[in-house]
Amino acid sequence: MILHQRILQLTLLTCSWLSLSAVIALAHPHILRATDRTEVTAEELLQDLAAVQVVFIGELHDHAGHHQAQLSIIRALQKDRQPLAIGLEMFRKDSQTALDLWVGGNYSLNRFLKDYNDNWSMWEKYREIFEYAKRQKVKLVGLNLPREISSKVARQGFAALPERERQALGNVQCVVHPEYGDFIRRAMGGHGGHGQQYLFFCEAQMLWDTVMARNLADFLKANPEHRVVVLAGSGHAWKFGIPRQLLEQMEVTYRVVLPEIDSRVSRTGIAPDVADYLWLNEGADGWTF
């Protein structure tokens, strides 16, 4: 009898832990709407995102929770009838062939990883997104420019590029919204002020945003039936970043979803000219739609 009671107690305890784990694993995201700073449901967020052509989702590159949230949105939008593509800061445009082969199933993981590592790092953080795109045949779009170009501009300024490259890239200038300028200074560690170091870094940021927006616009014009979810660093995804440059290229409907990041964008400082939605820290590690 005692043994039976003990087994029953252990069974109930196990069930309680399993139930609690399920609740934690399926905890709903905490999403703040920027216009009125009120929390909205996942369903309300997704309904709004499904009404536009481009969805920008910011990230800290090494934050696993941010990538889980991105994948949750991608999965939800993939259920819609509109074809879906994923735009990537993580891949250069000149590596598009590797992305096409990967999604097409004609590339082994080992071969793809060589291209991935040539473009980016932290594969384990991004693995689920790339594997999902392959399984579901979601087109991946490389948006970035060669790293050596942006690095040179950050060190020496846009004028240091050869004239032929400058003409091809357009007249990039450090003309930014004051709030975006403050973000750039914070990204520099608070250094640089208004001097040459800041100017060069700002030009590199503008070049990065402009080229990614241009490549995104090229894809949208060639594939107008597609919706695109753009995955990019939090700063690039701000409305002052790629979205602003995209609107210089074409008319398009879009939304920006950013993660709450201390010293960058918070629930007390979020504004509709920065983003449309902010996912709060307490929900960043457990998003499930």
Image (tube, rainbow, N blue to C red):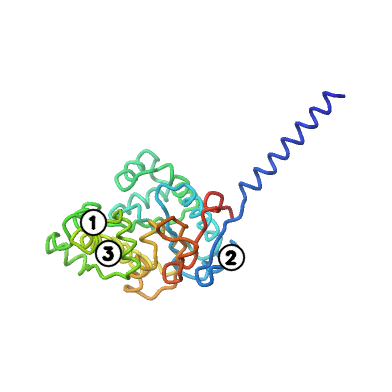
Alpha carbons under labels 2 and 1: distance apart: 38 Å
Q: Which callout, 2 or 3, points at the residue further toward the start of the chain?
A: 2
The residue lying toward the viewer, choosing from 262 and 17, is 262
Q: Residue 135 placed where, x, y %?
A: 49, 49
Q: Quadrant of the N terminus?
A: top right
The reply to whether the C-beta atoms of the residues labelled 1 and 3 are less than 8 Å apart is no
Q: Residue at x 12, y 60 (%)?
A: 162
Residue 162 in view of the camera: yes
Dividing the picture into quarters, in which one does residue 85 lie?
bottom left
> Disc 1 marks which residue?
150
Q: Residue 132 placed where, x, y %?
A: 49, 49
> Disc 3 marks which residue?
206
Characterize the local packing of mark 3: few (<14), some (14-19) or many (20 or more) Cα atoms within 10 angstroms. many
Alpha carbons under labels 1 and 3: distance apart: 10 Å
* Element class at badge 1: helix
- The type of residue carrying mark 1 is Ser
- The type of residue carrying mark 2 is Val
Residue 40, numbered circle: 2
Q: Residue at x 62, y 50 (%)?
A: 26
Residue 226 in view of the camera: no
Q: Is residue 197 left or right of residue 189?
A: left
Alpha carbons under labels 2 and 3: distance apart: 32 Å
